[in-house]
Structures are given as C-alpha cells and as structure tokens.
Image (cartoon, rainbow, N blue to C red):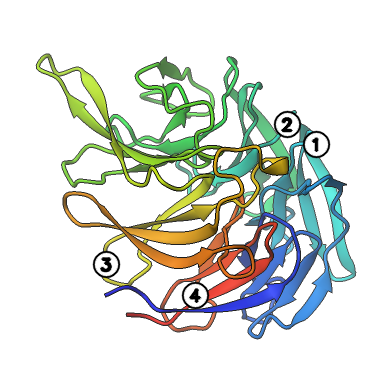
Amino acid sequence: MPVKWTKRLIAAEAYESAGIFDVNGDGHPDIVSGAFWYEGPSFKTRHTLGDVARFGEYYDDFSSIPLDVNGDGRMDMITGGWWGNTLRWRENLPSGWKEHIIAEVGNVETTRAWDVDGDGYIEIVPNTPGGPLVVYKLRRDSEGRGMGEFDAYPLFSSHQGHGLGFGDIDGDGRGDFILNNGWLQAPATGNPLEGEWIFHPEFDLGRDASIPILVVDVNGDGLNDLIVGKSHSYGLDWWEQGRDASGARIWTRHPIDPFNSEYHDLMWLDIDGDGENELVTGKRYHAHPNQEDPGGDDDIGIYYFKWTGESFAKQVISYGPPGVGSGCGIHFAVADLRGTNRLDIVAPGKDGLYVFFNEGL
C-alpha cells in the first residue's frame, strides 16, 4: 500500500533549494528557501532572509545546509551557487541575516554535508565541476562550538566532474568519495583529511551524475552499491558492487527508471515507516535553461522507489504538468514537520515551493 500525501503550496517562488531547521528557537521546525523563511508550524508567516542574486532563470543559491557556524546557539545556513563562485554562510542574527564568504571555490553545482573525518561533526563539501575536491571543516572550540571560520582540506587535485557522493565502498568503516568517473579511497589510518586518498577509476556514471550519488547496500549482500540519477538527461540507475572470479571489484548497472529525466537530488530514508529505507527523488524542473536537457519540458514529478528484493517499485507522490505535478529542485528537504513521526517532504523548484505532508499508509 503506498503512502498517502497532502500537497500544500507554501510560496509561488522559483528558488531551487530548501532547508528545514528551527530558525527562531521556538521549538518548531521552519522552512528556509532562497530569500525567505517560513515560520512553523503553520508556515504561513514569511520572513525575509536576504537578497539572492538572480541570473536568468536561476537564483545563485543551490543548497540550504543548517549549521551553527559561530556557536551562538542559533542555526545558520550554508549555501553556494554557480555564478557567485563562492561557498557562503548566512548568519542568523536577532536583527536579521548577514552573509559571509567561506571561500572562493569556482562554480558550485550544489553543496552537501558529510562527516568526512568521523569526529561526529559534518564537513561541507561543494561539487565544483572543473575544480578540485576540497572539504571545508568548521573550526570548533574545546566545547565543540563553532568558531565562525573554516579550514580547507584539498583531497583530490584533479578536476571533479558533475556528481558527488560519500560512503564506505570497501567496507573498512571509513567513508570514501564517489565521483562520476571513479571513487576516492580514504586513507587506512590517521586523520582522513590529512592523508592520501587513492583514486580508483572503476566505473563511469556519466557526465551528468546526480548530487548526491548514494552509497547503500541495495540488495543486502554486505557490499555497498551506488544509486545515481541523470541530472540533465533521462535515467536513474543502481550500480551493483560485486567480485569477479579473481576477487577483483566489479560494477553492474541496473536501470531503476529510464523514462524520466533530471534526477538531480536523491535521498535514502524510511518514508513509509516500515523500518526499511526507500529511494526518494524527482525531477529538477528546467535544470538547464530553455528546456535544453533531454526531457526538460516533460511533466514533472516526485517519487519514492521501494526495493522489493529483486528490483525497485515506483510510487508516485506527485506527477503532471507544472501547477499539477511538482519537482524537487536541486536541494530538497525531509523532516517530521508536524510531530506525527512521519517524514514530510519540502520540495522547492522553479515551479514553486511545496510541502507534501505524509499521511501514512
């Protein structure tokens, strides 16, 4: 039985990123997207966050990662964009918001947060096609509070492509990085941010791989596999990790959905509450301007895919032309917004900002 959903328009805005966190400290999750934040629990009151530069169809705001950067107890936000060429944090002040530059990084496709060094705190990792892979670590005091500054750790000097993931490929308990043309093996000992990462060109996921590329054990065989969407063309696949007769690692591609396009952002979480994770994803509406992507002007949708033990079964959350169906932008967000113990979906995009309330099975 599929999950039932209640769809609600939050704002007719065209920002493509959204985050969920308690902005004002009242104990309720709020929605942050682009130049505004929407006060929970009703999300009807809109507050200004600050101007976001616009370039044609796009706003230069491709992530909304919550992080208390300066340790003042208020949650700030990390973002970056293609045109500004910077990684930035937006400081949550009682009087408003103030933007700070973390680093000049070049074109940012989008940004993700992972605990790269295993210390219990997230690091910030932008996907910068054409640039090196650099991890940004927040400086913290002896109590673990953020100190407002970041240290840069270059891990791979060769150019990144479009696509980035993080997870344990080789089963050694350390997270590895996945690029569109191979994976970077974490150092076996010591601080991963300070050691040598080894590149393994074992696969080619295509020049428009999703961000993130998910690292999960899809079939339960004890080996982590990959799930990757085509961000600017048709396709969604999982790549099975296996071994050949000599024991060497091999990868086998399995289609999940070859019939829809612009799968840019993906999540792996328990959306139906059965204790098993599902793949949640959808179309980034007009991921490139003038609908130049294959399928760019197709109907839009958000879906979850349930592993049956043999393949993925597609469940439709929303589908149709803009105004009927919805996409999920470049950085969507999932959280329990109403205290129901069910995960709701906040879906930004050029088609508007929507919430899909999870009503259960």
Q: Earlier in the sequence, mark 2 or mark 1?
A: 1
Quote the CA–CA distance across marks 4 and 1.
33 Å
Per the image, the residue denoted by label 2 is 107
Per the image, the residue denoted by label 1 is 83
Per the image, the residue denoted by label 3 is 275
Quote the CA–CA distance across marks 2 and 1.
6 Å
Quote the CA–CA distance across marks 3 and 1.
41 Å
Q: Residue 226: x, y in percent?
A: 35, 38
Q: Which residue does the image show at 47% across and 50% down from the upper left?
A: 266
Quote the CA–CA distance across marks 2 and 4.
33 Å
Q: Earlier in the sequence, mark 2 or mark 4?
A: 2
Between 311 and 335, the residue placed more toward the observer is: 311
Quote the CA–CA distance across marks 3 and 4.
16 Å
Per the image, the residue denoted by label 4 is 336
Of circles 3 and 1, the one toward us is 1
Q: Please tell me in which quadrant of the rendered image residue 343 appears.
A: bottom left
Between 194 and 44, the residue placed more toward the observer is: 44
Of circles 4 and 1, the one toward us is 1
Left or right: where 175 falls relative to 353: left
- Whether the residues at callouts 2 and 1 have beta carbons within 8 Å, the answer is yes
Given the image, on which type of amino acid does mark 1 rest? Trp
Crowd rating for badge 4 (residues with CA inside 10 Å; few <14, some 14–19, many 20+):
some
Q: Earlier in the sequence, mark 3 or mark 4?
A: 3
Q: Which residue does the image show at 53% across and 73% down from the upper left?
A: 356
Left or right: where 23 falls relative to 173: right
Secondary structure beneath disc 1? loop
